[in-house]
Amino acid sequence: MTTRRRGRIPTAGTLEATQTDRAGAARRAASWTPPATKAALFTTLGKVAIWGMLGCGPLALITAAVASPNPASTATSTGPPARSPLAPAGWAELYVAAYLQAGDNSTAVQQFFPAAPPSLRAAGRRQATRTVTVAASEVNPGYWSVTVAADVMDTSGPTTKSAGVHYFMVPVLALGGPESGGTGAAGRRPGFVATALPAEVAAPSVSGAPELGYDGTTPITRGPLQDTISQFLNAYLAGSGDLGRYLSPSTQLHPVTPAPYRSVQVTSINAKGQLADADSSVPADGTVTHVLATVDAVDGAQQRWPLTYALALTARAGRWEVTRMQNAPALAPSTDPRTSTDPRTSPPITSPSPDTPATSSPAAPVPETPAPDPTPPPATDPTQPPTSP
């Protein structure tokens, strides 16, 4: 027979002692304090947290001020959109062409200048085969003065003959937005009206040939530089060979296609400054030279066309490579408009070189000339033609 062991039943004294022990442990836990070093650490961390929270407020304000620029300053820096002269210039070219061939019927001219007389009499005996804008200036906001060159043919006789190039100044009022030369809101439908008939004016002045910045005393007639330029231009103009063979690794240039010439013959090469032994050797890698090359390009009819190219070449691995085809030949310092003396001012304002600091001198005053009348033309309703003055 198995006897089961029964647990001891706690008495009242035992329960009281247990409760007393628990109460003592709770009092000891409540009265415990950390060591001095730990207490200091907790105090420091608490201070850091408090100061961090206080600093977040000003920092957030500074960040918001930097991220959100002042609308007024933004508007001041950008300013109003620039007005383009392209549309008034193109419209003026059409006006001049219509004026030259109007004759007794000025209906076509009245589409540009509603106050034009019914008959322009002598006009109509000429015809413009080509018109080109050579100057455009804004007299007042949205009010343009455009000078148009017209290649004119005289049609008054039994045969048509050339009357040369004539120049006409046209006043144009632009009625659209800034993209069409007007003062209206951007995107507004463009409109134009002439305020007078064209005025024939003198041709722009043409000076003598300017001096270029190349050595004309020692032309390069042979050698590796001449070979590279000849082969490059034959590949570029006549489709002879791979153009990439003659270009520097970073240069991107495409040949003229379809090739307009059969062959290209170099007639002269002049370098900018002295280039030692250019006829026989290639200098050290990285040497750069600028040249002006004149060639005769021969077309399919065996006609020779003289052409001129301004090129920059760099020496690499014992040969010359074309680095850049320049937009225009280099000017001599005496003819460069950045450094030449303007007779109306003394001394001139000089343009510094990349290796020297910028310096400038104040220009002497220019004699005053009568200013044009700044009074803007009368306001014009885009939907109604202007009245005759």
Image (spheres, helix red, strand yellow):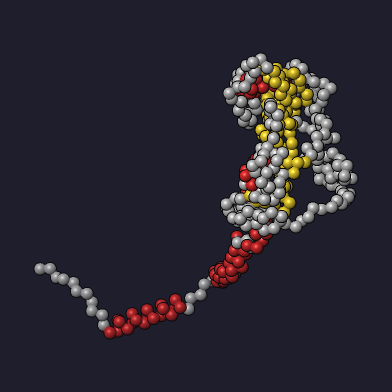
User: Along the horizontal axis of the image, is 226 left or right of 346?
Assistant: left
Residue 271, by quadrant, is: top right
Residue 95, compared with residue 54, is above or below; it is above
Position of the C terminus, as image quadrant, is bottom right
Return the residue nearer the eye: 196 or 52: 196
Residue at 23% across, 77% down: 8
The image shows residue 183 at horizontal and vertical percentages of 65, 55
Residue at 48% across, 76% down: 32
Res 172 visible: no
User: Along the horizontal axis of the image, is 324 left or right of 368?
Assistant: left
Return the residue nearer the eye: 190 or 109: 109
The image shows residue 344 at horizontal and vertical percentages of 87, 44
Residue at 66% across, 15% down: 302
Position of the N terminus, as image quadrant, is bottom left
Residue at 61% across, 18% down: 240
The image shows residue 71 at horizontal and vertical percentages of 63, 62
The image shows residue 2 at horizontal and vertical percentages of 12, 68
User: Along the horizontal axis of the image, is 37 left or right of 232?
Assistant: left
